[in-house]
Image: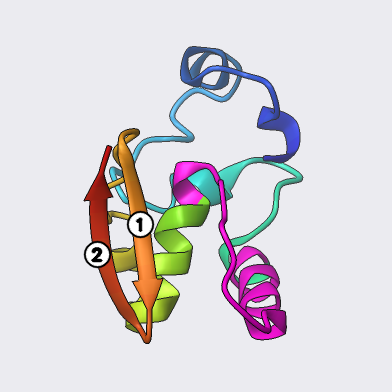
Amino acid sequence: MGAWEGLTCDDVEARWPDLLDGGDNMWWFRAPGGEQYEEFKGRVENWLGALTGPVIVVSHGITGRLIRGLMLGLPATEALILPSPQDVVWHIINRKIEALSL
């Protein structure tokens, strides 16, 4: 998150007025000094490609969205708006994704 690390959305808006304007879902990648979407996607793709068996992953919402989006072959604009509820375990197998409610 670059210069935004550890800040709230209110902190970001106060320090960088209007930077979050625009309403698109790529706002995570606007942080000064932060990682761009393609870099982030590349890291996640490399990690997914290195898996050799079943794994359990605990992540933040954006990473979970990206993993599911990559598994489904979605473009960034669709992957980054996937739901990210706090009470779901995503079961992903053979490019099929199922939400297991807790």
Q: Is residue 86 above or below residue 50?
A: above
Q: Quadrant of residue 70?
A: bottom left
Q: Is residue 19 magenta?
A: no
Q: Quadrant of residue 31?
A: top right
Q: Residue at x 68, y 84 (%)?
A: 52
Q: Quick one: quadrant of the N terminus?
A: top right
Question: Label 2, on which residue?
Answer: 98
The x, y position of residue 27, in whole percent, is 45, 45
Element class at badge 2: strand
Q: Residue at x 35, y 83 (%)?
A: 95
Over which residues does the magenta segment extend?
40-62
Question: Label 1, on which residue?
Answer: 90
The x, y position of residue 101, in whole percent, is 23, 43
Q: Is residue 60 above or below residue 24?
A: above
Element class at badge 1: strand
Q: Is residue 52 magenta?
A: yes
Give the number of callouts. Answer: 2
Q: Is residue 93 visible?
A: yes
Indicate the amino acid at tag 2: Glu
**Res. 58 mark:** none
**Does residue 15 appear to the left or right of 91 in the view shown?**
right
